[in-house]
Amino acid sequence: MLELASIIILGIFAQWIAWRTRVPAILPLILVGLLVGPLATLWTADGSKLIEPIYSVEEGKFGLFPGGGLFYFVSLAIGIILFEGGLTLKRSELKDVGHAITRLLIIGSLVTFLGAGFAAFGLMGTSWKISMLFSSLIIVTGPTVIAPILRNIPLTKNVATVLKWEGILIDPIGALVAVLVFEFIHSGAGGEFTTHALIEFAKIVAVGFTYGVVGAYGLAYMIKKEWIPHYLLNVFTLALVLLVFVGSDLIAHESGLLTVVVMGMVLGNLDVKNLKEILDFKESLSVLLISILFILLSANMDISQLQMINGNAIILFVIVVLVIRPLGVFLSTYNSNLSFNEKLFISWVGPRGIVAAGIASLFGLKLTSDGVPGAELITPLVFMIVLGTVLLNATTARLVARLLNVTKEKSDGIMIIGASEASRLIGKYLLGTERNVVLVDRNERNVEMAKIMGIAAIAADVYSDEIKDSFELLDVGTLFAMTGSVDVNKKACEKYGSDYGENGTYRLLSTAELKGEKGAGKPPSGIFSYHDDYLNINKVASDYPEIFEKEIGSKEELISFNNLANSKFSSIPLFLKSGNKLEVIPSDLEGFEYTEGLLFVYLGKELVE
């Protein structure tokens, strides 16, 4: 009981440490697992691990999972994690990411697959099967390791976009490649790839894709017909994923992982109204599973496996980081609009993550138990790549970015809390000023309407922490809180101002504040409009859905025109624009420094002086 409780407690503690230090969670999780596992044998009195995952009397291990229990738990946990990863892959995103990113996903992955495979074969003396499985596993970077690094560095738009989309899209793609390579190896595990082995591989692929597609469409149909009560939706989905996993595995042995990856990818691209709820549940479940999983997998390694990390393994790591990754990036981005320095930085940032480590451990366990020569090297080699790249990038990315001059002086993206009609109009205007704009609203209809207008939008609650996990907000430096609730607006400014308001945090006034009611005086700063509340600004946006720019010739004209706009219910002042500089109109323009070519930006009916 103590060991089971300790795994969960240590796992969540490691997740908290990752949150506090802003490093990928996989780093403290693996380190904790190594400390209570193989490294503990160096200082415990009897040379035993503090946490022993496997129970085996023959091997002298008295741990948690007897027989194949650990393998089955890892299989099901990885299956759930891969299903959640598959849900995030959208065909539309793949088409929209641009030529360079698409090539990076294809050419970059192929270079890593072939290059790392040849390097492992030559340096580690493993068979071609094990070498290519290793290389397929390190294709994956993943959003969980990229996001914490990018969130702390104000990168140029080109670099941030490439790394963001590579991290999002390569996770399920890389997992699918790794699963296919494993199935190919496993189908011929008893010897050479005979006709029978190839037939078995074809069977695995056929069953995996068939069951995955059928499972996805079946679940989507049941949700559409409302055959599943809302309170059972998440747990029913979990049960169905496990059913499809086990069912396909019974028909074609080891086809379960492929099945759930395909099921997630297909379901994620269907019009399922409750998909976000399913995804949120799977993300929460994945956090718990990942916390348990990586402590177990790290603890399961032995000192002998760690000792396999010899000089040749270090050379392999250096080749992967300094040769293979840059080669893949430069080939993929040839003739693109990326500068040489931007390509160099993208080459430097390639941390491997949770999917790589998790699947490596699973495959290592399975192939080792099947007696495949060299399989015991899979887990330590991949863990070396994961830990090495995460440590390297987390500690040096900022310095390298500055040396290569691929950082921006400040983040110019804008987040608007609330996706009402007025917010959408303002967001559309701001997009035209070449700024990244993201709208956040818990109302999914408002979010969808924003997306139809071409504005990035997130369906989220400001009281949750999910907003901070969004890649779309990496370059946000200004926050506008524009919901109909003063409490929500205040909470958004308080909670997210430090992360996303380096250039300013602004909110709408409440009706009580506008009227100057007792205890509700107007704050001196941080206000989007001193004359209009949520109802006023959205009424004008509905009646006169246009935004105008008026060139101002002097400071006196600026004050006069601002007073005119404020006196008209049909017009609302928004911004002062000078070149690419944009700022919210202050309450007192007397101290404002006028510059030639200044534009007065307002919403509503066009004003005629």
Image (cartoon, rainbow, N blue to C red):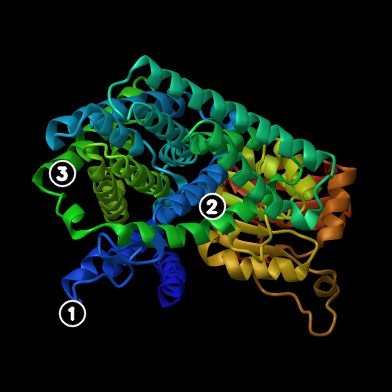
Image vertical order of residue 574 relative to residue 359, above or below: below
Residue at (17%, 75%) from the top-left corner?
43
Q: Is residue 408 visible?
A: no
Identity of the residue furthest to the bottom in this view: 518
Q: Earlier in the sequence, mark 3 or mark 2?
A: 3
Taking depth in this image into account, of 428 and 72 the one nearest to the observer is: 72
| Closer to viewer: mark 3 or mark 1 | 1
Rendered location of residue 188, percent (x, y):
34, 26
Q: Of the residues shown, which amino acid type is indicated by label 2? A: Val
Q: CA distance from mark 1 to mark 2?
A: 53 Å
**Three-letter amino acid code at the position of disc 3:** Ala
Res. 248 image quadrant: top right
Residue ID for mark 3:
313
The image position of residue 448, as x and y in percent, is 75, 41
Residue nearest the observer in this picture, 586 or 21: 21
Looking at the image, residue 518 lies above or below residue 178: below
Residue 196 sits in quarter: top left
- The disc at residue 45 is 1
- Residue that badge 2 annotates: 476
Q: Amino acid at mark 1?
A: Ala
Specify which label sits upstream in the sequence, 1 or 2: 1
Point out the image quarter for the C terminus: top right
